Image: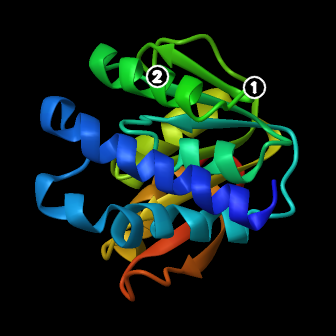
Amino acid sequence: MNVSRETEVLEQYAALIRKWNPAINLVAPSTLEQVKSRHIDDCLQLVDVSRSSSGNWVDIGSGGGLPGIVVAICRPDMRVHLVESDRRKCSFLRNAGRELKLTNLNVSTERIESINPLKADHISARALAPLPLLLSYVDRHLVSGGRAWLMKGRNWRTEVEAARETWRFDVTSHPSVTDSEAAILEISELRHA
């Protein structure tokens, strides 16, 4: 997808979030006016750090599609599967996929812990759960040799320490460009402690 087309589709996506948010609460109402700078740009950095990735991508706890829809827009070469348990949010996600013509997008209305293992090459999550719990979801759905791309806030270091009590993993932290205290955690070689 060329840059101008990608930018246009991302703007359309931001408009859809603004339109649907009063009814469904896809993002915090206080951040609605900063959808692009606060949410979409945040997810674009995930696309940048995972640029060399290939295979199938699963976004768990997709909510309003951040980062899953952004990945689908920017990486039309990848199959992107969104998993969200809230039916209303899934209606938004499916509608967004149709309106944005994202033929590489699939949406499942199921709980992460009960859906059949998805055998993902890559898993993403943003603002979903503390890392020790989040890694149990990743472990269920990630193939051996796969990578998780987890967007974490200012407590990410503490969460990594807590997760190491139960899990063994390699982690690379990519500093956030939108929040100096946040990071994208690239996790591989995940196994029980």
Q: Is 4 on the left or on the right of 68, as rendered?
A: right
Near mark 2 (Cα within 10 A), the count class, few <14, some 14-19 or many ≥20, is few
For the residue pair 16 and 162, the one nearer the viewer reads as 16
Disc 2 target residue:
95
Q: Residue at x 56, y 28 (%)?
A: 97
- The location of residue 45, given as percent across then percent down, is 59, 71
Q: Is 58 on the left or on the right of 96, as rendered?
A: right
Q: What amino acid is found at the position of numbered circle 1 in the picture?
A: Lys
Q: Secondary structure at mark 2?
A: helix
Disc 1 target residue:
119
- The location of residue 92, given as percent across then percent down, is 38, 25
- The location of residue 189, given as percent across then percent down, is 75, 53
Q: Residue at x 68, y 21 (%)?
A: 118
Label 2 to label 1: alpha-carbon separation: 25 Å
For the residue pair 152 and 67, the one nearer the viewer reads as 67
Q: Secondary structure at mark 1?
A: loop
Residue 187 in view (yes/no): no
Sequence-first tag of 2 and 1: 2
Q: What amino acid is found at the position of numbered circle 2 in the picture?
A: Asn
